[in-house]
Every structure is written in C-alpha cells, then in structure tokens.
Amino acid sequence: MKVRVVRVDSSKAPAWADAAVEGWRKRLGRGLPTDEQIVPIEPFRGDVEAVRSAESERVLRMVGRGRLVALDERGEAVDTAGFVQLIATGRASGDLVFALGGPYGHAQSLRDAAWRVVKLTDLVLAHDVARVVLWEQIYRAQAIATGSPYHHT
C-alpha cells in the first residue's frame, strides 16, 4: 500500500518546491512507499467549470482503487492527530490518493467521489506551497505513527 499525490500542475514546478518534496519523500524512505503524478493543466478557454471538470475527470481516472482525499479550501479542517488517523485508515484499505487541484480547484464531481475532502489550513496557499505542506504533513504523520522524534508534543 502506498500514498500517492496526484496534482494538477504544469510540468515546470519551481525547483525549490521539487527539492522540498524530494527531501520529504527521501526521508520517508521505504517505510511509506509514495508516488507523485501530474495531471496537466487544462488550457483555459473562457469556461472555469469546463476546466475544473476536465481536470477532475483526469484525476479520477488516475485514482484507480485508491481512497481519494481531495484537498480543498472548503474541506473539513483536520488537526495533526486527525491527519495521522486519516492516513492510517485510508492506507488500511489500499492506496491512499491525495488530489491537489489546479488553479480553479476541483469540480464538484471529484469532491463527491472523494472518500474525504479536507483542507490543509484556513489560509489559501499557493499551489506549490500547498504541495510542500502536504508532503511535510505526510512525513509528520508517518513519524508519529512510527514513534520518530520528529514530532514533539
């Protein structure tokens, strides 16, 4: 079982974000298999809903049998303990897939298909910042689950 992140993004993420994500993934090591996949941003042709819908359909095709957690600013707030529990429960059923939407977010169809819809913070974050925060929180959850001293209470 693995944790996957599917993100709607251009293929040209900033080097600092890629480096940060790779750092967290490297620290996770073999203890928690991970993967990250990119869904290309849909070109904007004047219809935001059409963009959301097309991107969300492609994300949903990549989820497969995994449990989908849609990251959305309108989602449920979870604290660290809740995030640890979310990962533990999700992984118990197979792959756990986190979806980071594009500039216009997720379509309602994706939110409806998700096992959970959560927000990382009450703040609205730039896409690349949200990606790095997500990976750090995945690492933190794994550290807590394994008793690593990374997380101090």
Image (spheres, grey):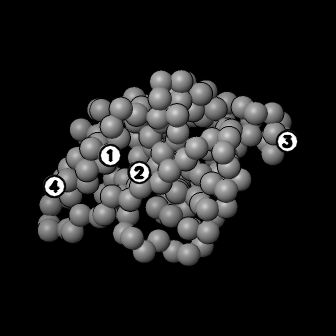
Secondary structure under the numbered disc 2 in the rendered image: strand
Query: Which quarter of the figure has residue 55?
Result: bottom left
Tell which circle, 3 or 4, labels the residue nearer the N-terminal end.
4
Residue sitting at x 46%, y 61%: 127
Q: Which image quarter holds the C terminus?
A: top right
Query: Which quarter of the figure has residue 42?
Result: bottom left
Q: Disc 1 designates what residue?
A: 62
Nearer to us in this view, 79 or 100: 100
Secondary structure under the numbered disc 1 in the rendered image: helix
Instruction: Give the percent coordinates (x, y) of residue 10.
Output: 36, 69
Instruction: Give the percent coordinates (x, y) of residue 69.
Output: 43, 37
Q: Which label is found at residue 6?
A: 2
Q: Disc 3 designates what residue?
A: 149
Query: Which quarter of the figure has residue 79?
Result: top right
CA separation in Å, label 3 and label 4 = 46 Å
Amino acid at circle 3: Pro
Residue sitting at x 38%, y 64%: 9
Left or right? Give the position of 80 relative to 117.
Answer: right
Amino acid at circle 2: Val
Q: Dots 4 and 2: beta carbons under 8 Å?
A: no
CA separation in Å, label 1 and label 2 = 8 Å
Amino acid at circle 1: Met
Left or right? Give the position of 107 relative to 141.
Answer: left
Secondary structure under the numbered disc 4 in the rendered image: helix
Say whether residue 100 is visible: no
CA separation in Å, label 4 and label 2 = 19 Å
Tell which circle, 4 or 1, labels the residue nearer the N-terminal end.
4
Q: Would you place residue 35 above or below residue 145 in this image?
A: below
CA separation in Å, label 4 and label 1 = 19 Å
Q: Dots 3 and 2: beta carbons under 8 Å?
A: no
Tell which circle, 3 or 1, labels the residue nearer the N-terminal end.
1
Q: Would you place residue 34 above or below residue 94 in this image?
A: below
